Protein backbone atom coordinates (compact mmCIF):
# COMPACT_ATOMS: atom_id res chain seq x y z
CA UNK A 1 0.00 0.00 0.00
CA UNK A 2 1.35 3.43 -0.91
CA UNK A 3 2.37 5.61 2.00
CA UNK A 4 1.14 9.18 2.35
CA UNK A 5 2.78 12.22 3.90
CA UNK A 6 1.19 15.58 4.71
CA UNK A 7 2.65 18.96 3.72
CA UNK A 8 2.08 22.61 4.62
CA UNK A 9 2.35 25.10 1.73
CA UNK A 10 2.47 28.82 1.23
CA UNK A 11 3.13 31.46 -1.43
CA UNK A 12 4.70 34.89 -0.94
CA UNK A 13 4.86 38.16 -2.85
CA UNK A 14 4.16 38.53 -6.55
CA UNK A 15 4.01 35.25 -8.46
CA UNK A 16 6.91 35.52 -10.86
CA UNK A 17 6.56 35.67 -14.62
CA UNK A 18 9.16 32.92 -14.89
CA UNK A 19 6.41 30.29 -14.67
CA UNK A 20 6.30 28.86 -18.19
CA UNK A 21 3.04 26.96 -18.41
CA UNK A 22 0.72 29.71 -19.64
CA UNK A 23 2.13 30.38 -23.15
CA UNK A 24 2.32 26.67 -24.00
CA UNK A 25 -1.27 26.07 -22.89
CA UNK A 26 -2.50 29.07 -24.86
CA UNK A 27 -0.62 27.90 -27.93
CA UNK A 28 -2.63 24.68 -27.88
CA UNK A 29 -5.86 26.67 -27.81
CA UNK A 30 -6.71 25.85 -24.21
CA UNK A 31 -8.78 28.82 -23.05
CA UNK A 32 -9.45 29.11 -19.30
CA UNK A 33 -12.96 29.19 -17.91
CA UNK A 34 -13.63 32.57 -16.29
CA UNK A 35 -15.16 32.84 -12.81
CA UNK A 36 -16.18 36.16 -11.28
CA UNK A 37 -14.97 36.72 -7.71
CA UNK A 38 -17.66 38.31 -5.54
CA UNK A 39 -16.72 41.24 -3.35
CA UNK A 40 -16.61 40.10 0.29
CA UNK A 41 -18.81 42.04 2.70
CA UNK A 42 -16.41 43.49 5.26
CA UNK A 43 -12.92 43.52 6.73
CA UNK A 44 -14.29 44.16 10.22
CA UNK A 45 -13.87 41.40 12.83
CA UNK A 46 -17.09 39.45 13.23
CA UNK A 47 -18.41 36.29 14.82
CA UNK A 48 -16.43 34.30 12.26
CA UNK A 49 -13.10 35.84 13.35
CA UNK A 50 -11.21 36.14 16.62
CA UNK A 51 -7.80 37.18 17.91
CA UNK A 52 -5.86 34.05 18.84
CA UNK A 53 -2.74 35.80 20.16
CA UNK A 54 -1.38 39.30 20.72
CA UNK A 55 2.28 39.92 21.57
CA UNK A 56 4.32 43.07 22.09
CA UNK A 57 7.68 43.81 20.54
CA UNK A 58 10.60 42.62 22.65
CA UNK A 59 12.76 39.68 23.70
CA UNK A 60 10.76 38.12 26.52
CA UNK A 61 8.63 34.98 26.20
CA UNK A 62 5.51 35.81 24.19
CA UNK A 63 7.12 38.93 22.68
CA UNK A 64 8.51 39.24 19.16
CA UNK A 65 11.65 40.84 17.76
CA UNK A 66 11.82 43.40 14.97
CA UNK A 67 14.51 45.56 13.39
CA UNK A 68 13.62 49.09 12.29
CA UNK A 69 16.35 49.39 9.68
CA UNK A 70 16.79 48.26 6.08
CA UNK A 71 14.30 45.45 5.36
CA UNK A 72 12.45 45.84 8.72
CA UNK A 73 12.35 42.12 9.58
CA UNK A 74 9.91 40.86 12.21
CA UNK A 75 8.32 37.42 12.66
CA UNK A 76 9.02 35.83 9.28
CA UNK A 77 6.68 32.83 9.16
CA UNK A 78 4.05 30.99 11.18
CA UNK A 79 2.06 27.77 11.14
CA UNK A 80 -0.96 26.31 12.92
CA UNK A 81 -0.55 22.57 13.47
CA UNK A 82 -3.22 20.80 15.50
CA UNK A 83 -3.88 22.90 18.60
CA UNK A 84 -0.59 24.84 18.47
CA UNK A 85 0.63 28.05 16.86
CA UNK A 86 4.30 28.11 15.77
CA UNK A 87 5.96 31.49 15.07
CA UNK A 88 9.37 31.96 13.44
CA UNK A 89 10.73 34.80 15.60
CA UNK A 90 13.92 35.19 13.57
CA UNK A 91 15.19 38.43 15.11
CA UNK A 92 15.28 36.66 18.50
CA UNK A 93 16.79 33.50 16.92
CA UNK A 94 13.95 31.23 18.00
CA UNK A 95 10.66 29.56 17.19
CA UNK A 96 7.93 30.25 19.75
CA UNK A 97 5.09 27.82 20.35
CA UNK A 98 1.66 28.83 21.70
CA UNK A 99 -1.72 27.27 22.34
CA UNK A 100 -4.63 28.56 20.27
CA UNK A 101 -6.01 30.41 23.28
CA UNK A 102 -2.83 32.52 23.41
CA UNK A 103 -0.92 30.58 26.06
CA UNK A 104 2.88 30.43 25.78
CA UNK A 105 4.25 26.88 25.62
CA UNK A 106 7.96 27.09 24.82
CA UNK A 107 10.72 28.70 22.79
CA UNK A 108 13.16 26.70 20.65
CA UNK A 109 16.55 28.25 19.90
CA UNK A 110 17.48 28.05 16.21
CA UNK A 111 20.88 29.78 16.52
CA UNK A 112 20.32 32.13 13.58
CA UNK A 113 18.74 35.57 13.31
CA UNK A 114 18.36 35.42 9.52
CA UNK A 115 16.00 32.46 9.00
CA UNK A 116 13.40 33.19 6.32
CA UNK A 117 11.04 30.20 6.07
CA UNK A 118 9.62 27.52 8.35
CA UNK A 119 7.72 24.26 7.98
CA UNK A 120 6.20 22.20 10.80
CA UNK A 121 5.08 18.61 10.33
CA UNK A 122 2.20 16.82 12.06
CA UNK A 123 4.53 15.60 14.85
CA UNK A 124 5.72 19.10 15.75
CA UNK A 125 9.14 18.74 14.11
CA UNK A 126 10.31 22.14 12.90
CA UNK A 127 12.36 22.89 9.78
CA UNK A 128 13.77 26.40 9.30
CA UNK A 129 15.45 27.63 6.13
CA UNK A 130 18.05 30.42 6.16
CA UNK A 131 17.88 30.96 2.42
CA UNK A 132 20.13 33.94 1.72
CA UNK A 133 22.67 34.50 4.52
CA UNK A 134 23.73 31.14 5.98
CA UNK A 135 22.07 29.18 3.15
CA UNK A 136 21.30 26.25 5.39
CA UNK A 137 18.33 24.18 6.47
CA UNK A 138 17.87 22.95 10.06
CA UNK A 139 15.36 20.47 11.46
CA UNK A 140 14.54 20.37 15.17
CA UNK A 141 12.55 17.83 17.12
CA UNK A 142 9.62 19.07 19.18
CA UNK A 143 11.82 19.22 22.29
CA UNK A 144 14.27 21.54 20.54
CA UNK A 145 16.97 18.97 19.74
CA UNK A 146 18.78 19.68 16.47
CA UNK A 147 18.17 16.63 14.30
CA UNK A 148 19.51 17.67 10.89
CA UNK A 149 21.68 20.44 9.44
CA UNK A 150 22.08 20.70 5.69
CA UNK A 151 23.51 23.29 3.31
CA UNK A 152 21.29 24.40 0.42
CA UNK A 153 22.44 23.11 -2.99
CA UNK A 154 24.04 25.80 -5.14
CA UNK A 155 21.46 25.14 -7.90
CA UNK A 156 18.78 26.73 -5.71
CA UNK A 157 19.53 30.43 -6.21
CA UNK A 158 16.28 32.02 -5.02
CA UNK A 159 14.37 29.78 -2.56
CA UNK A 160 10.79 30.89 -1.93
CA UNK A 161 9.49 28.26 0.54
CA UNK A 162 10.40 25.17 2.51
CA UNK A 163 8.18 22.11 3.10
CA UNK A 164 8.86 19.20 5.41
CA UNK A 165 7.27 15.83 6.05
CA UNK A 166 8.90 12.98 7.92
CA UNK A 167 12.44 12.60 6.60
CA UNK A 168 11.72 14.58 3.42
CA UNK A 169 12.66 18.24 2.96
CA UNK A 170 11.50 20.17 -0.09
CA UNK A 171 12.58 23.66 -1.20
CA UNK A 172 10.64 25.78 -3.66
CA UNK A 173 12.69 27.78 -6.17
CA UNK A 174 11.36 31.08 -7.59
CA UNK A 175 7.71 30.17 -6.84
CA UNK A 176 7.82 27.70 -9.70
CA UNK A 177 9.49 24.34 -9.08
CA UNK A 178 9.83 22.29 -5.90
CA UNK A 179 12.95 20.23 -5.19
CA UNK A 180 13.45 17.43 -2.69
CA UNK A 181 16.88 17.72 -1.07
CA UNK A 182 18.73 15.21 1.07
CA UNK A 183 22.09 15.07 2.83
CA UNK A 184 24.57 12.36 3.69
CA UNK A 185 23.56 10.70 6.98
CA UNK A 186 27.24 10.42 7.94
CA UNK A 187 27.96 14.11 7.38
CA UNK A 188 25.53 16.37 9.22
CA UNK A 189 26.08 19.87 7.86
CA UNK A 190 27.13 18.76 4.38
CA UNK A 191 25.69 20.25 1.21
CA UNK A 192 22.33 18.80 0.29
CA UNK A 193 21.71 17.09 -3.03
CA UNK A 194 18.61 17.35 -5.21
CA UNK A 195 16.89 13.98 -5.44
CA UNK A 196 13.52 14.82 -7.01
CA UNK A 197 11.77 17.71 -8.77
CA UNK A 198 8.14 18.59 -9.38
CA UNK A 199 6.70 21.48 -11.36
CA UNK A 200 4.45 23.54 -9.13
CA UNK A 201 3.08 22.59 -5.73
CA UNK A 202 0.67 19.79 -4.82
CA UNK A 203 -3.06 20.51 -4.79
CA UNK A 204 -3.61 18.40 -1.66
CA UNK A 205 -1.40 17.95 1.39
CA UNK A 206 -0.46 14.39 0.54
CA UNK A 207 1.69 12.63 -1.99
CA UNK A 208 2.14 9.02 -2.98
CA UNK A 209 5.44 7.27 -2.44
CA UNK A 210 5.39 6.51 -6.17
CA UNK A 211 6.06 10.20 -6.81
CA UNK A 212 2.66 10.93 -8.37
CA UNK A 213 1.52 14.49 -7.75
CA UNK A 214 -1.42 16.72 -8.51
CA UNK A 215 -0.11 20.26 -8.79
CA UNK A 216 -1.34 23.84 -8.95
CA UNK A 217 0.19 26.96 -10.51
CA UNK A 218 -1.07 30.53 -10.32
CA UNK A 219 -0.23 33.50 -12.50
CA UNK A 220 -1.53 37.03 -12.87
CA UNK A 221 -3.13 37.88 -16.20
CA UNK A 222 -3.61 41.62 -16.52
CA UNK A 223 -4.77 43.85 -13.67
CA UNK A 224 -7.77 41.88 -12.39
CA UNK A 225 -7.26 38.22 -13.24
CA UNK A 226 -5.30 35.30 -11.83
CA UNK A 227 -5.15 32.08 -13.84
CA UNK A 228 -4.95 28.79 -11.98
CA UNK A 229 -3.58 25.68 -13.66
CA UNK A 230 -4.56 22.53 -11.80
CA UNK A 231 -3.15 19.23 -13.08
CA UNK A 232 -3.76 15.66 -11.94
CA UNK A 233 -1.01 13.08 -11.38
CA UNK A 234 -1.15 12.20 -15.10
CA UNK A 235 -0.42 15.86 -15.94
CA UNK A 236 -3.87 16.44 -17.38
CA UNK A 237 -4.38 20.15 -16.80
CA UNK A 238 -7.35 22.48 -16.41
CA UNK A 239 -7.12 26.28 -16.61
CA UNK A 240 -9.44 28.59 -14.66
CA UNK A 241 -9.31 32.38 -14.58
CA UNK A 242 -10.43 34.13 -11.38
CA UNK A 243 -11.57 37.65 -12.23
CA UNK A 244 -11.44 40.03 -9.26
CA UNK A 245 -13.75 43.06 -8.87
CA UNK A 246 -10.75 45.31 -8.08
CA UNK A 247 -7.21 45.60 -9.42
CA UNK A 248 -4.65 43.23 -7.90
CA UNK A 249 -1.47 44.64 -6.40
CA UNK A 250 0.10 41.22 -5.88
CA UNK A 251 -0.69 37.57 -5.21
CA UNK A 252 0.48 36.73 -1.68
CA UNK A 253 -0.80 33.24 -0.95
CA UNK A 254 -1.60 29.87 -2.53
CA UNK A 255 -2.46 26.92 -0.29
CA UNK A 256 -4.67 23.83 -0.29
CA UNK A 257 -6.68 21.81 2.21
CA UNK A 258 -7.27 18.08 2.57
CA UNK A 259 -10.32 18.24 0.28
CA UNK A 260 -8.17 19.59 -2.55
CA UNK A 261 -9.58 23.12 -2.41
CA UNK A 262 -7.21 25.95 -3.38
CA UNK A 263 -6.95 29.11 -1.25
CA UNK A 264 -5.61 31.96 -3.35
CA UNK A 265 -4.96 35.25 -1.55
CA UNK A 266 -4.49 38.53 -3.44
CA UNK A 267 -3.78 42.05 -2.23
CA UNK A 268 -6.49 44.13 -3.94
CA UNK A 269 -6.45 47.93 -4.29
CA UNK A 270 -9.03 49.58 -2.04
CA UNK A 271 -9.38 52.85 -3.99
CA UNK A 272 -8.58 52.57 -7.69
CA UNK A 273 -10.21 55.89 -8.63
CA UNK A 274 -7.78 57.95 -6.54
CA UNK A 275 -4.76 55.83 -7.51
CA UNK A 276 -4.27 54.78 -3.90
CA UNK A 277 -1.82 51.96 -3.19
CA UNK A 278 -3.72 50.91 -0.06
CA UNK A 279 -4.82 47.28 -0.29
CA UNK A 280 -6.72 44.65 1.60
CA UNK A 281 -6.42 40.88 1.31
CA UNK A 282 -9.01 38.76 -0.48
CA UNK A 283 -8.81 34.99 -0.15
CA UNK A 284 -10.74 33.00 -2.76
CA UNK A 285 -11.55 29.36 -1.97
CA UNK A 286 -11.70 27.35 -5.20
CA UNK A 287 -13.04 23.77 -5.26
CA UNK A 288 -11.67 20.85 -7.35
CA UNK A 289 -14.99 20.95 -9.25
CA UNK A 290 -14.14 24.40 -10.59
CA UNK A 291 -16.42 26.47 -8.34
CA UNK A 292 -15.73 29.40 -6.02
CA UNK A 293 -16.78 28.16 -2.59
CA UNK A 294 -16.37 31.44 -0.67
CA UNK A 295 -14.30 34.60 -0.39
CA UNK A 296 -12.82 36.17 2.74
CA UNK A 297 -11.64 39.78 3.05
CA UNK A 298 -9.00 40.82 5.58
CA UNK A 299 -7.11 44.07 6.35
CA UNK A 300 -3.58 44.24 4.95
CA UNK A 301 -1.99 45.58 8.15
CA UNK A 302 1.80 45.25 8.38
CA UNK A 303 4.76 47.42 9.44
CA UNK A 304 7.38 44.65 9.12
CA UNK A 305 8.67 42.51 6.28
CA UNK A 306 7.95 38.79 6.42
CA UNK A 307 7.28 35.81 4.17
CA UNK A 308 3.76 34.87 5.24
CA UNK A 309 0.50 36.74 5.67
CA UNK A 310 -2.07 33.93 5.68
CA UNK A 311 -1.97 30.27 6.76
CA UNK A 312 -4.61 27.66 5.93
CA UNK A 313 -4.95 24.50 8.03
CA UNK A 314 -5.79 21.10 6.50
CA UNK A 315 -9.39 21.56 7.72
CA UNK A 316 -9.67 24.95 5.98
CA UNK A 317 -9.23 27.30 8.96
CA UNK A 318 -7.83 30.65 7.76
CA UNK A 319 -5.32 32.45 10.01
CA UNK A 320 -3.68 35.83 9.43
CA UNK A 321 -0.66 37.53 11.01
CA UNK A 322 -0.79 41.34 11.40
CA UNK A 323 1.86 43.73 12.73
CA UNK A 324 1.64 47.33 13.93
CA UNK A 325 3.51 49.69 16.28
CA UNK A 326 2.15 47.85 19.33
CA UNK A 327 3.18 44.36 18.26
CA UNK A 328 1.86 41.24 16.51
CA UNK A 329 -1.64 39.78 16.22
CA UNK A 330 -2.72 36.37 14.97
CA UNK A 331 -6.36 36.25 13.86
CA UNK A 332 -8.56 33.33 12.86
CA UNK A 333 -10.91 34.66 10.18
CA UNK A 334 -12.66 31.47 9.12
CA UNK A 335 -13.14 28.18 10.91
CA UNK A 336 -13.28 25.47 8.26
CA UNK A 337 -16.57 24.53 6.61
CA UNK A 338 -18.64 25.70 9.59
CA UNK A 339 -17.87 29.36 8.90
CA UNK A 340 -19.99 31.74 6.85
CA UNK A 341 -19.24 32.36 3.20
CA UNK A 342 -18.35 36.03 3.66
CA UNK A 343 -19.97 37.02 0.36
CA UNK A 344 -22.77 39.31 -0.68
Image (cartoon, rainbow, N blue to C red):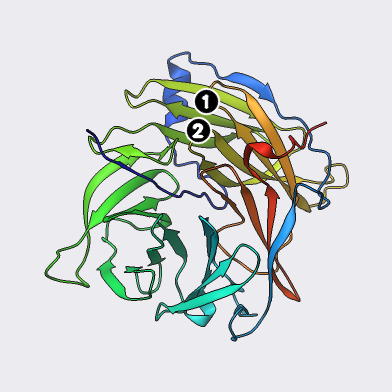
Where residue 333 appears, x then y in whole percent? 71, 50
Q: Which residue is outermost to the right? A: 274
Which residue occupies 57% across, 69% down?
98
In the picture provided, is 99 more to the left or to the right than 123?
right
Query: Which numbered tag is attached to residue 288?
Result: 1
**Residue nearest the viewer, comparing 59 with 61:** 61
Q: With 53 as the anchor, is 233 left or right in this view? A: left
Q: Do the residues labelled 1 and 2 touch (CB within 8 Å)?
A: yes
Circle 2 sits on which residue? 259
Q: In which quarter of the image is residue 326?
A: bottom right
In the image: residue 294, left or right of residue 33:
right
Q: Position of residue 40 (x, y in %)?
A: 79, 37
Q: Quadrant of residue 206?
A: top left
Q: Image check: 334 left or right of 246?
A: left
Q: Nearer the viewer, residue 316 or 288?
A: 316
Instruction: Judge whether residue 55 can be spotted in this image.
Output: yes
Tell me which residue sits at (88%, 47%) in the image. Answer: 274
First-in-chain label (1 vs 2): 2
Label 1 and label 2: CA atoms lie apart by: 8 Å
Q: Position of residue 288 (x, y in %)?
A: 52, 25
Amino acid sequence: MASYVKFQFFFLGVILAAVQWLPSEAARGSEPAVLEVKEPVSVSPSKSSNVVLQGAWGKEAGQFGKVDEASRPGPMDFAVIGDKLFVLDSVNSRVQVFTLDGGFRKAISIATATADFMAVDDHGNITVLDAFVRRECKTFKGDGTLEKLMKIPAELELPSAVFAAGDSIWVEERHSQVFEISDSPEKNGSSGKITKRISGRPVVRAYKSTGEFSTVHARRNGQREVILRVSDDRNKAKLTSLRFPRAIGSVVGLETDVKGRCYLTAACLTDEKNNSWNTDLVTVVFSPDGEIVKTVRMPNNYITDHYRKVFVTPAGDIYQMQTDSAGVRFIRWESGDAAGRGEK
